[in-house]
Amino acid sequence: MKLWVTLEGREAEVTFRTEGDRLILEADGRHIEADFVRLPDGEVYSLLIDGRSHVVRVSPSAEGLEVGLRGSVIPVEVKHPLEKMLQAASGARAAACGETVSAPMPGVVVALRVAVGNHVQAGQAVVVVEAMKMQNELSVAHDGVVTEVLVAERAAVSAGQALIRLAPVTGGSA
Amino acid sequence: MKLWVTLEGREAEVTFRTEGDRLILEADGRHIEADFVRLPDGEVYSLLIDGRSHVVRVSPSAEGLEVGLRGSVIPVEVKHPLEKMLQAASGARAAACGETVSAPMPGVVVALRVAVGNHVQAGQAVVVVEAMKMQNELSVAHDGVVTEVLVAERAAVSAGQALIRLAPVTGGSA
Amino acid sequence: MPRLQRVLIANRGEIAVRILRTLRETGRTSIAIFSEPDRTALHVLMADEAYPVGPGPSHESYLNMERVLETAKRVRADAIHPGYGFFAENEAFARACAQAGIVFIGPSPETIAALGDKLAARKAALAAGVPVVPGSPGPVDSREDVKRFAKEMGYPLMLKAAAGGGGKGMRVVRSDAELATAWDLTRGEARAAFGDERVFVERFIERPRHVEAQILGDATGRVAFLGERECSVQRRHQKLLEETPCPAFDDATRRAFGEAAGRVAKQVGYRSAGTVEFILDEQRRFYFLEVNTRLQVEHPVTEMVTGLDLVAEQLRVAEGDELSFGDAPPEPRGWSMEARIIAEDPARNFLPSVGVIERVRFPQGPGVRNDSGIYRGYEVPVFYDSLLSKLVVWGGDREQARRRLARALDEFVLEGPHHNLAFQAWLALHPEFAAGNLSTQFLEEHWRPDALKPGPEATNAALLAAALHERSERQRVQIGRREDARGASAWKWMNRQRGGR
Amino acid sequence: MPRLQRVLIANRGEIAVRILRTLRETGRTSIAIFSEPDRTALHVLMADEAYPVGPGPSHESYLNMERVLETAKRVRADAIHPGYGFFAENEAFARACAQAGIVFIGPSPETIAALGDKLAARKAALAAGVPVVPGSPGPVDSREDVKRFAKEMGYPLMLKAAAGGGGKGMRVVRSDAELATAWDLTRGEARAAFGDERVFVERFIERPRHVEAQILGDATGRVAFLGERECSVQRRHQKLLEETPCPAFDDATRRAFGEAAGRVAKQVGYRSAGTVEFILDEQRRFYFLEVNTRLQVEHPVTEMVTGLDLVAEQLRVAEGDELSFGDAPPEPRGWSMEARIIAEDPARNFLPSVGVIERVRFPQGPGVRNDSGIYRGYEVPVFYDSLLSKLVVWGGDREQARRRLARALDEFVLEGPHHNLAFQAWLALHPEFAAGNLSTQFLEEHWRPDALKPGPEATNAALLAAALHERSERQRVQIGRREDARGASAWKWMNRQRGGR
């Protein structure tokens, strides 16, 4: 089985197969083998890699997968080869579609710093959301123009809810 | 809703209904009310009975239900009224059908103390099963005659596996 | 005073659980209160009794004074333990309890009031002969006044808004030249932020440590000093890791420090458990900051080295009893550290996180104590603070405590919301932390988010885990549509990906 | 001796987890071994490395000496920690380790051999001037010899098969008349059970306590006494609850006891951790029983009051270092108790139980330590012993420790196999236990299974829970077959019931 994996900013083609309880994987010219067993406790695996014991949990996230490992969370993007081909073709289009600022967690909108039509710069804070007694400024990743403000101040918002939409500035860095 | 409940050796008709998060129950002339919520953790309920907090877990068992409560396990038998009627009718027949001695846990048969045709008395040990480094004598509940010995010594047995069957003694206490 | 048999805990989360444990161990009835989203919170499940006090927002439930007191009266509570936060340092609440004939477990309303006013507290410390950060006795009126101060004390100085708080309205000034612009800026900010342009001057303490004294007073006027706690590792003025003893203290410093804290407490007739906060400069001189008139989040480290139960002592004092140890507080033994386990994402500037606790396995074994308010399946509510659990360790010396902390953090399984376990592990293993070189600037000086980058072994494990996950996903797809050709199966993958799994 | 960097743990379950915690805290690599059914056991998941050693039955894996040693050599282990049980007191294994150039963490093979022979151990104690239970110096040949003994020592006496063990082949004799039949019966049983009809005589100690001394010896010949443990509460010679100090000891008894244990240990040149077991009669006289040449299941109570890590001390000694505290063992502080949490059913004569751990929440908070080998979802295997977890508590005095134990037991959530939590809670709350009136006869004298009958409040809660369960079952049935008439629905109920849900 072949996959395209993006991990720690590096992309690699990965080939793997299983033989009983063993997983054999090749990536970047490296050969990794592990004894694996799925634990009776969700999407959790015990791996023994050359005897080294690791317990890893895999959960889906917005960007792909998250692998939990000894208190750390490592994001991994996994693509099927065909999927990768199709995505490459549509990649250029997606980049020009603008940006949406969403609530990263449930909370209350404390302040709106922009209105429709405002020009904003990459890194500029556009909305403040309070959750768990902490105020959090949300900023935009790219230069743009505000096209929609989807919430009012004092509104309760849920995680992932779209708050503000922006269109890219013509000629700006997308 | 009506149920027949056997608890701590006493049988009672129970009437209950729910109103939102409140459970209202009548049994034995007593009236009990509780605030309840199902916890996100299996068949577990939090009950507040006149403010008193109880966490109870319900699980099915061979005889009916088991309610776990602060380290204790309380067996409860619950019957639907129709079920009770039908069971009463077939009760007499069932009593005369003899007895089966089963393994209470997985283990190894260490000793067989009886053979087919033996007469045994209520309480008599008929087989010894070893599990977790402990030997456990299994005895019969009623007087009877051994009709089948279903395992050999040194055999591994699983939980609930029938080991020995007995027929009731004519005129004996069933 | 009769025994306090029925005690209502006017709090939630880990501290409510902490308090009810002592109530149970001392044979008292524990009475919890809860807001609507807290119906399934651990303190409700564990208490003897539990009663609702309103909707999620604190001011409608836990801070609804009328409702809380009405509940306490209705259920015949003998006393109320406020925990920390909420009503813990609220003079009016303490007074209302007394009027309702309910014992408030804490200092008297007068003490709370006197120490709640920071200027009055500073005066009490001065009156007790305890050093405060040198500065102007009141607001300064002009730039020239500041310059005169600078001549006396030397730069750097700190301009502080009189009405400030929470780290706002403060500015460091290092020379007369800097002062020129700083004066107007600070006053402008103070006016804008607090509607009050009054400004104080204080000597600026570079790389200060935050060290505090645990005190315990009883009705006889006796005040015991139960050792210090070092709480320097902070982020946005929130403590992250506390320990006792303070690695910068020698015996002489400790003795002087304990005497100073005791003098402040006696000055105000302090009763019950309290904390006298100081800052410590690089020459190990300490300066009074303020008194917290309550049980502190980090009180367990003191319990670990003294063997005392501070909640039990509070109950004794509230019943009019003497302290359990009379005039001889136990000698501290060994070293203790507490790591606050918080729902936040260190990789995204410590953004708070919420969600369901999908899996939790607390570290166990020798020298480990968990004070926690969570359990598997519990949903962390959005209304309250983000402290999930406190991991407390004990060791014979600082090195054993620190290594044990690292071991326990490594063993801690927590999945669901983002959390700071990996951050705390980074901290425990940092060479400057190991050397005891602490200050409130520790994170500014040492923390970089890429410190949590996984090593090659972890990366390999993650790669394998991702492959195993895809394999089982794929098996599921293939089992589901066994008749499908390869192409159709790949399309299904696409859809799943687009659906934002 | 070089540092032992890579340590293989030749054990499983809670003790393997216990040992690997210390290895991690001291910066060493922990190497687990596992049998096939233990692939998902906690010690495998938590260790740095883990290697298979064979099928489930102990003699094919954990007791497969060749395989274990081959594995240790292959993975370049510097040392092996045997835990308790398995190879812990196996002279041949200790010798084989030495031959393979691997350090065995424990006493020398010669010490293990000398103390493994009970008659030799008794002789060593006598040589060290330590009292043993008065009795015949060797086997007695005739009824007349026993009568002569009885004249000297008085009745009651105990006849003991020389080759006996595990509580078999023992008979109490209270008069010459009883002796007449007892003599032949005991010899007959001994011949039948052990193929050896030799019989000893000992004074019978009525209502004895079981008290043991923790000792620790280093290579310099130094032997430290680290306090006693009271382990009287037993069932079928299995300890259930241990504590330190012994409630029957005064300072003079403790001093004499510690000196006696130290003399026995020095007599055999004891090195590493060990336990000298004694029985204590009702007049508080103690008599040597035997020496266990290993870490004991109940070692944590000693750690709780001394603050020492006994595994870390074992490692120091194995590396040739002195004990961490030199000649001054720490003064014990407070009181500690350990309750063994066992998979067994107290209501059914403590029948062992197995199964999946469906839900587990360990008690936490002040003064609580859990040493455990289980986690949620783990299946308790049938091959090994039924100890799931050890709940250890500390308190300032016995009363606080006991109440804390009761609190922690109450807080412990464990579902799946049957277990003895409710039994331990009964014990902790029993007035005779609270009074410290213990003997190995405690359960015979006080325990009745109906002690666990639930009270009216629990019965009500159970009734409500059952009703709620039936309601949700019924909703499920009705949602599933909404079109059904009442009769058909009832038939479905019947089928479910018959299916043996």
Image (tube, coloured by chain):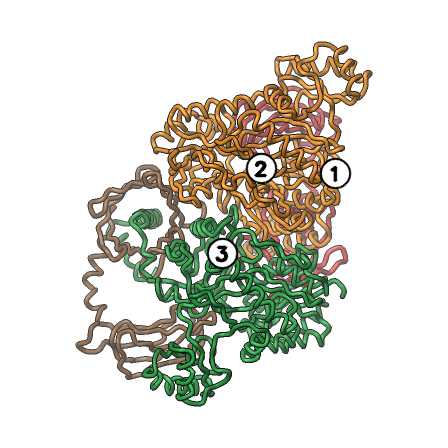
Chain colours: A red, B brown, C orange, D green
Where disc 3 sits, the SS reads strand
Mark linked to residue C352: none
Chain name for mark 1: C
Q: Is residue D90 visible?
A: yes
In front: mark 2 or mark 3? 3
Evaluate if marks 2 and 3 touch, with contact meaning CB atoms under 8 Å apart.
Answer: no
Q: In x, y percent, where is residue C133?
A: 69, 24
Q: Quadrant of the C terminus of chain D?
A: bottom left
The amino acid beneath tag 2 is: Ser
Q: Quadrant of residue C1?
A: top left
Nearest to the observer: residue D448 or residue C479: D448
Q: In x, y percent, where is residue D99?
A: 71, 76
Q: Quadrant of residue C99?
A: top left
Which residue, given by chain and number where applicable, does mark 2 sit on?
C353
Q: Residues within 10 Å of mark 1 (few under 14, many from 20)?
A: few
Q: Does residue D263 lie above or below C437 as drawn?
A: below
Which residue, given by chain and number where applicable, does mark 1 sit on?
C446
What is the spatial separation of the Cα atoms under label 2 and label 3, in whole angstroms?
39 Å
The amino acid beneath tag 1 is: His
Chain name for mark 2: C
Nearest to the observer: residue D490 or residue D240: D240
What is the spatial separation of the Cα atoms under label 3 and label 1, in whole angstroms?
43 Å
Chain name for mark 3: D
Q: Is residue A33 visible?
A: no
